[in-house]
Amino acid sequence: MTSNDADDRTTRDARATANDADERTERDGGDRSADPLALDADDLVETYPAGRYRGQLSDRFALPARSARTVPADDALPADLAANLDVDLWSHQAEALFALEDGENVCVATSTASGKTYVYGLEIARRYRENPDVRALIVYPTKALSRDQERELEALFDELGLDVSVGVYDGDTGPDEKTRIRENANVVVTNVAGLNQYLDGHHRWTTFHANCSLFVIDEAHAWTGISGMHAAWIVRRARRVIDWYGGDPRFVLTSATIGNPGEHARALTGQPATVIDDDGSPRGRRHLVFWEPPSDGGDGDVAERAGGTRGSADDWSPGRPATVEAPELWAHLCYHDVPSLLFCDSRKQTELAIERATEFLENPSLPYRKSTRLESYNAGHGKRARRETERGLAAGSLDGVATTSALEVGIDVGGIDGTVLLGYPGSRHAFWQRLGRSGRGRRDALSAFVPRHATLDRYVLRHPEYVLGGSHEDAVVDLENNPVYLKHVECAARELPITRDDADLLGGPERLERAVEYGRRTGDLEGSLAGGVTYAYRDRPQNRVNLYASGGDSFDVRAVGDESIDHESIGRARAYRDYHEGATVLHRGEQYQVREFREDGPQPYVELEAVDVDYYTQSQRRVSIYDPEVRESRTVGGFELNWGYATVTVRYETYAKRDVASGETIEAGLDTSVPPLEMRTQTCWVRVPPGVERAVERRHSGYRNDECADLPPRLHGYLGGIHAIEHAMIAVSPLELTVDSNDLGGLATNRLPDGSDASGWFVYDGVEGGLGFSRRIYEEYESVARRARELMVDCECGRDEGCPACLMDARCGNDNRPLYAPAATDVIDALLDDGSGPADAAITDSRGDADSTSEEDGDGGEDVADRTDRGRDDRRPPASVS
């Protein structure tokens, strides 16, 4: 952390009572005599039905208990407030309050259930005591979380004996209540989408803005990528409006543990923040098991095959689906008095989990006799049903609940002792946030991770150290996206005239000058920065801000007939990819199918119908990249690595239906009927040294893929290698960044579209203007490449062509052909080698150039193309022939 009063802070910190337990993560073992859990890892194996246990316990760990570190409440609070608080403060809460007292902004990045709400709740109380007219703005990511936190804050203020008025201001708030909140509420709770709209009516918030002294962004880690860009500009617009009325708020951001909390806080707010990440809250001992579904096919044990030579598809089977194994494990825990949550991806999975768990417990051949009460919890249930389930959890009358992410944060789950994750949730902070729903406070807990046959799941299974230690993923907010920036300049110009004094908040002097000049040329803006720039029309540009899209038209999402659906608008890229006619869509755990896709009217839209089907859909893509523009360049292991911009054309021509349980293809080659999509976006790309290309091509010239008849046979190995690297780097990128790999695309080619005639591969941002993800991959390229190599060499499939858990991508427009791991590892070893090791020597060659062929990949989809047509414009990649 940083502080301007280091000596004073050291004195304060010395008052903390430190009763720290050893923080090392140990392999399970040691004294269990004081463990109150009904089951631990050993008991789990001993009690599991003999006919159903086949070595699923892949690994187990015990995370030691941690005692609380506390600070007397009256050290950080006025005596009268401290007297009404029944507990001492945890050290991180006190540290944050000390920093706020010193005038600093703070970012509190501590574990689940560590009392982060108390930080800003107590700070509001402290300010209210000094000035009853004080105002605070709290922004939550969702409306549901806003309502939950409103109740928690009101309970805190009641405990403190303060008449602090709290109001939730969103689309569900009635007109009269909105007036009362604007005029009288001390604390206004809203969400980012709402804040974007309300800034236009700032004249109705005069008293609030003038007295606003605290601005809270809860769950700040959720704002990353394109939604993070929008959130950052909306916060800057809010700062500008509040400042105009005389308010000067400090910022409090709360976050799960991420790799760059200070950087992320500054990106969102435009101001520095003191990071508070030394967690003083207690925790009980946690038993963590990695539970691998058994193999149902293939010759020999999975471990033996993983350690053997690479073979064919006949030598390997993905095993039993996690969608079957996880509900049975969860049922076993619940039966044995370990009340547990099962986290699933969708509403349908929660309902299927109940069915499978019930069948498992009622199987007469298994040793389960007493009744076990299990329920599902998801957005598809009515509000009353969800509240009954919540009360059952809090009261302990339920043995287990299968849930979507709806129970991940914000709701009291009572005495839950166990958590089962059906698959990896995509990030370390989500992994621990879900596990942290059990064993809250000082309670011991048993948690299980059941991996699916998917890339990140298998990586975590083979590399448990990834989630158990080390650095966390970085949250990425990139403000360089010009389409997003221009939208918010228009909004700011409607809210208040823009002058040169606004440059620091709105992108800097030069960028603001260019934006205003562009707006004047298009007729959207009028005036000058000397006298004030205003929006030229009477409509509200805030209505065109879509938190999940950058440039181009947004698509409304509607329900068929008289039904209604609360779904945000979507950008064109996402509409083409995931909302074409016939696509299935999961929204808040509900399953829908796209019945109509229209963009020929003034407002494009898609129309959804609720369905209950046993498949999901994935589109395949073909991509072309041209006109690359280098902004930055560096050398990695003799390879030239570039970052910049390029024009990308993506064709979403076909899609496939896949089984929900197994992921197997049911039907493929279905027509999407959407046109090509072109965007100028950010990308990073590698230029392979000619000597490495020649050596790898010669070394693997004997590899043949009979389904790649259009490629010269001796090139199958090399092209399959760089294609595999591109797939693997996109697949593992979420291990380093808070990114959805669906927001990235790639291309592998032996003729880069830069006139160099060199081979290489691209990774690009799949959104107009870019997201900042490819830029961060450029900066962390070596780390991402190492994880990609680990993914390839550690996969138990043992296949040269890989499998869906390592190299294959369901969106691959070339149907994952060719992919060749041996060539890929040779190339990536050369990239990571410093020139003195065996990797460089192993593939050094002096032969002439290889024949000309290329392969393209868009978000996992690619084309194989002949590059022998020298008469075309050399800026463009070869024409597709797939």
Image: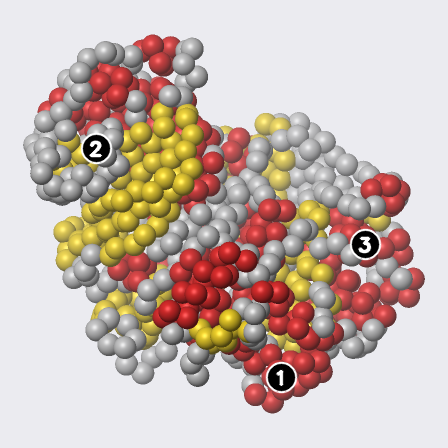
Crowdedness of circle 3 by 10 Å Cα count: few (<14), some, many (20+)? few
Mark 1 residue type: Arg
Mark 3 residue type: Asp
Q: Where is residue 830 in the image (x, y as percent from the top left)?
A: 36, 19
Question: Is the C-beta separation of discs 1 and 3 under 8 Å?
Answer: no
Label 2: which residue? 751
Q: Position of residue 164 (x, y in %)?
A: 76, 75
| Left or right for 195, reference 116 | left
Label 3: which residue? 102
* Rendering quarter of residue 358: bottom left
Can the viewer see residue 100 in this picture? yes
Q: Which residue is drawn at 81% across and 54% down?
A: 102
Check disc 1 and report its element: helix, strand or loop.
Answer: helix
Q: Which residue is drawn at 15% across and 31% down?
A: 853
Image quarter in which the C terminus is found:
top left
Q: Residue at x 82, y 42 (%)?
A: 6
